[in-house]
Image (cartoon, helix red, strand yellow):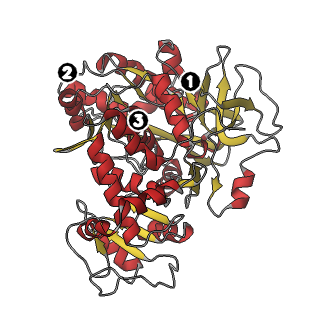
Amino acid sequence: MADWYEKKTFGSLPERAAARFGDAEALTFRERRYSFREVATRVDEVAKGLMAIGVQPGDKVCLWLNNCAEWMFFMYGLAKIGAVQVPVNTRFRTADLSYVMQQSTSTTLITHDTCGPVDYLGMVRELLPLGQGSNGGTLHSAEFPDMRRVVIFSERAYPGTISWAALRKAARQVSDEALAERAAAVHPDDTVFIMYTSGTTGFPKGVMHSHKVIRNIEERAVRMAITKNDVVLNYLPLFHLFGYAEGALMSMCTGARQVITETFNADECIALIESERATLMHGFETHLKDLCEAQQRSPHDLSSLRTGLFAAGMHSATNIKRRAASVLAPIKTLTGYGMSEMGVGSLLSSLDSSEEQRCETSGYPMNGYECRIVDPRTGRDMPLGEPGEMVFRGYGLMQGYFRKEKETAACYDAEGWFHTGDMGVMRADGYIRFLGRYKDMLKIGGENVDPMEVEGFLLEHPGVHQVSVVSFPDPRLTEVPVAFVQPKPGSGVKPADLIAYCKGRIASFKVPRHVIFVEEFPMTASGKVQKVKLRELAVQQLKPT
């Protein structure tokens, strides 16, 4: 039986968009602007270049690049010729890169020579024997037996690598007919990318997805009413699924213009909203809070803003989202929930959801997804309003973890429900509220404590910029709360002030026993605090009693 919806491939999207939107502007990066037609032409050029240097269908290709226009060309060019993209976190260094290249069995690495202060090529040279040949040649490494070539995104030629200029020159060797033949052989059910998880608790796992992710993007576009008239400000890293999906894929699926920034800078982004007339932007509560503060420091015309997806449900995000409705008006922020394993997003609110639903829940299931809240011990459904583990079924679940069959199987129960390890609650209105990771929950003398509740309370203090609460070992209570706080500059607040602020206002067992000031938090590339590192830091700084 045929599928009820048209199955598409990533590689076909630029060509389809060029046919629909032609010379309309598709992509902006710094001073450079590209129409949909120009993007499709650049994608084909890169695809031909990759074919010319030997990239084969099914080859895994590490894409270790910071945000730039060419990211898009490589992303779609690789997909068009049937290669599998392996986006690599640009915060990774030699040990992390080594793991991903080996584990993914990648044949090709695409990266910078340098970008800002980071010497990417220097790190590559520590791992791979690049040799002395100026034409790139073929690599042979006992440690990385699958790796064959390194492409450096630079006009300059480096021994043993392939330059950007050389790749484009090589593209002339490949005919339109040869490219079309390769593209026609790509099946929508093939693996198109392997997205490595954030790795907050150790080495990440490679999540495999097919081209069916496109269906999820198109479903989300309908719920957010995204059209060719929209402008997406994308400051999220393209190597992470959030920015990859809501910017790079969404633009080609809908005709919305995408404005890419290399990194997130709140002041720059506020200015870009005004100058580019951005209508959408997405992120986490940290982005939203910084954007609010930037607008208050230097007000800009934000009248073009329409909506954006900012994860909510957690106690720590509620007040920030309510504040944004005023400071970043007229934006109407939506809320959602997703994991790399579930294909972008499985929950999302809508434009006609109430303010309470958009600020205090994580939305309701997307078409094609089911969600239950279960007792993690018994698997039985929890009553409405009672917290339990969030489990999902749906078409968009991952193909599996690459070369990790046991870990893949362990995520599913006998009925095919994917177990997230996240705590949530089902409300009477059908909306679901994400409450946090089970592993982050605190058990204080037998009492369950949601760290996000304490974080949300502390964020109301005028001297607190950001806060993260973690557990600390205690011989009597098993563990106690510790608050890591980034104070607002010039506030003069002291750790004792924050502890006193909590006493008498929240339950005694929720009051942090210690407050540690930090200049910045260890973060994942997607903007999440790495709490495992904070727990380690607490043990280092505070001697357990």
Q: Which is more N-terminal, label 1 or label 2?
A: 2
Whole-number angstrom distance, CA of label 1 to CA of label 3: 15 Å
Which residue is drawn at the image coordinates 51% and 54% (left, top)? 184
Residue 460, given in percent of the width and then of the height, sits at: 40, 24
**Which residue is denoted by mark 3 in the rendering?**
283
Q: Which mark is residue 195?
A: none
Q: Nearer the viewer, residue 342 or 501?
A: 342
Disc 1 secondary structure class = loop
Mark 3 packing: few (<14 Cα in 10 Å), some, or many (20+)? some
Q: Which is more N-terminal, label 3 or label 2?
A: 3
Residue 304 appears in which quarter of the rendering?
Answer: top left
Whole-number angstrom distance, CA of label 2 to CA of label 1: 29 Å
**Mark 2 near mark 1, Cβ–Cβ under 8 Å?**
no
Which residue is drawn at the image coordinates 20% and 67% (left, top)? 155
Residue 473, given in percent of the width and then of the height, sits at: 61, 49
- Whether residue 209 is visible here, answered yes or no, is yes
Q: Nearer the viewer, residue 80 or 322?
A: 80
Answer with left or right where residue 91 lies relative to residue 292: right
Mark 2 packing: few (<14 Cα in 10 Å), some, or many (20+)? some
Q: Which mark is residue 363?
A: 1
Residue 347 appears in which quarter of the rendering?
Answer: top right
**Mark 1 near mark 3, Cβ–Cβ under 8 Å?**
no
In the displayed structure, 541 sits above or below 412; it is below
Mark 1 packing: few (<14 Cα in 10 Å), some, or many (20+)? many
Disc 2 secondary structure class = loop
Q: Amino acid at mark 1?
A: Gly
Residue 467, given in percent of the width and then of the height, sits at: 43, 37
Q: Amino acid at mark 3?
A: Gly
